[in-house]
Image (cartoon, rainbow, N blue to C red):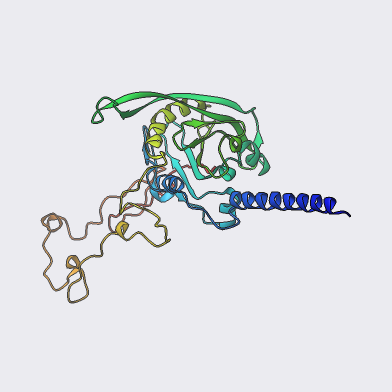
Amino acid sequence: MNKKNQLTFYLILALCAIFILTAFYFEGRATERFGQSFDTHLKSFKDAVENAVPTKVGDWFSESNEDQIGIENELIRRVAGADGALGRHYHGSSDTPDIQVNITCGYSRNVGAHTPDVCFTGSGSVQETSVETFSVDYQVLVPDPADPKKSVSEDRTATFKTAIFSDASSHYRQRVFWGWKGVGEGWIAPRFPRWHWNSNEPICKMYISLLEDNGYGREKVDTLKVAERFMQEFLPELDAILTGTYVLPEGSRLIPDDGSENVDAIPPAPVMNESGQTDEDDLSLPPVPDPQASAAPENSSGPEVKGPENELTEPKEAAGPTDKSGEDDEFTL
């Protein structure tokens, strides 16, 4: 091999090495091979999703003890690529179906994938309808450019994908809506989400699910109209916090970054006296007589109470809070 050929060979080898190293660098950044990156917009999304989503939306309300905040399973969290997550069940009325909302936030390369038409069918559900585009118009209040102290109404349009899925083993049919939101953008549902955003761009993904038969075996409901009414109430609240610049007020965090309990959220302990009892339970003090109790007969056991099926039940010794855990007929998505 002459000198000219040697130079050509080494030049090609150097170019190949540069190409491989460059590809390795960008692949490492995309997959966080070199460590997890930090993004202030992503942290803002996480704080807002896990701490600031409203618990009451129009006629719907939720119980905080039912929330699923974050993803405890590390494997699922890594597969889903979710840095922040919230699963919330909104209870409706007798003629309004319950609604399940799931929001995850993370980088586009992860959160842009795993749509219901792929994940649900892969886990055994049947997709009964084709995927359609659903748009909803709503209004939000924004600062008036002429006078920042005032607010003006702004018209917005959100776009989601929707389809109906069923599960033969669970005997339910649910309509699911899904879409994404980036920093400074509205809710959209592009065909290829990971192509719409850069791989390192933080976004939020949301599922809104409701049963087709209202969950109680009654007649079918128009889930499209119900979802539209819910979104018109819900989306303005989300747009106010999912800006990418939202800052969580100090002391209101539910799950601190270090994983410890939120001390501010724990009620203060009762004041104890020298005997180790609370002031309310201090037996050293004479009891205060109750005039109503003294007027009642000594051996009165009280009236018998009718049960839920109009059956007589045993008289209760003392009145106290009842357990209503078996009254709610909820569904799980």
Query: Where's the C terminus, which quadrant?
Result: top right
Q: How many numbered dots are placed on residues in this image?
A: 0
Q: Which residue does the image show at 61% across and 31% down from the upper left?
A: 191
170 lies above or below 272: above
The part of the image, by quadrant, that contains residue 269 is: bottom left
Q: Position of residue 74 (x, y in %)?
A: 56, 57
Tell which of 196 and 75 is nearer to you. 196
Tell which of 38 and 85 is nearer to you. 38
Q: Position of residue 177 (x, y in %)?
A: 54, 32
Tell which of 55 and 145 is nearer to you. 145
Q: Position of residue 64 (x, y in %)?
A: 39, 48
328 lies above or below 78: above
Q: Is residue 95 visible?
A: no
Residue placed farthest to the front in the image? 3
Tell which of 196 and 180 is nearer to you. 196
Q: Can residue 17 be seen in this view?
A: yes
Whether residue 158 sits left or right of residue 74 in the image: it is left
Whether residue 266 sits left or right of residue 103 in the image: it is left
Residue placed farthest to the bottom in the image? 275
Whether residue 111 sits left or right of residue 238 in the image: it is right
Q: Where is residue 173 in the image (x, y as percent from the top left)?
A: 59, 34
Query: Where's the N terminus, which quadrant?
Result: bottom right
162 lies above or below 297: above
132 lies above or below 282: above
